[in-house]
Amino acid sequence: MHRSILVIGYGSPLRSDDGVGQEIAQQIATWGMPNVKAIAVHQLTPELVELLAKVDIAIFIDAYPATADQEIQVRLLEPADGITSGHWCEPQVLLAMTQALYSKHPQAWWVMVPGINFELGECFSVVANQGMEAALQEIEQLMQSMRTESCMKLG
């Protein structure tokens, strides 16, 4: 049985490289993979917890301020130790909220794409474009390897 996967790309598409997470999620949505849902959001909010509780695997995608020679970073995530309030939060906080409300959370990964231009604009830098290509390849490999494993962690 294939595991369900939620891809959440986030960032501001009006701030150049900051929008790369949303762009990647939109591209993944066109792949038409079964049991994969990809969404693009401006920022992470507690409203995403319900979606996270329904999947086995979550992949968060965002840009990070980098230099021209830095590459994508992929990290396995665990829930944060504490839960903060507010409308914006880190992926680890969403996992902690999911655990607190549903007594489970998906296995989660954070794919961070290098960016060098976060000024107003809608074009990606060469660094972000290269990072996006690398991230798409890495995410596809990650999804293929994780789809048949048992990934839901019960608390």
Image: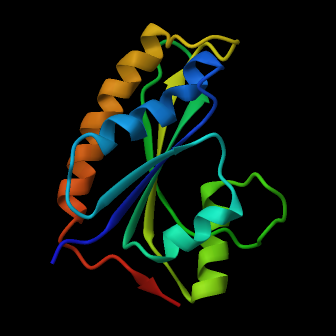
Work out whether residue 65 can be spotted: no
Q: Is residue 45 left or right of residue 17?
A: right
Up/down of 63 relative to 102, above or below: above
Residue 50: quadrant of the picture: bottom right
Q: In the figure, 38 relative to 73: above or below?
A: below
Foreground: 21 or 80? Answer: 21
Q: Is residue 60 above or below residue 92?
A: above
Rendered residue at 45%/14% (across/down): 127
Residue 33: give x, y in percent of width and height: 20, 53
* Res. 122 visible in picture: yes
For the image, the number of numbered tags is 0
Please give the name of the residue rendered at 56% of the width and 16% of the height, measured from the top-left corner: 67
How far across and how far down the image is residue 56, in percent? 37, 73
Quarter-wise, where is residue 48 in the image? bottom right
At a point 67% along the width and 74% down the height, the residue shown is 97
Residue 89: image location, x then y, percent: 72, 55
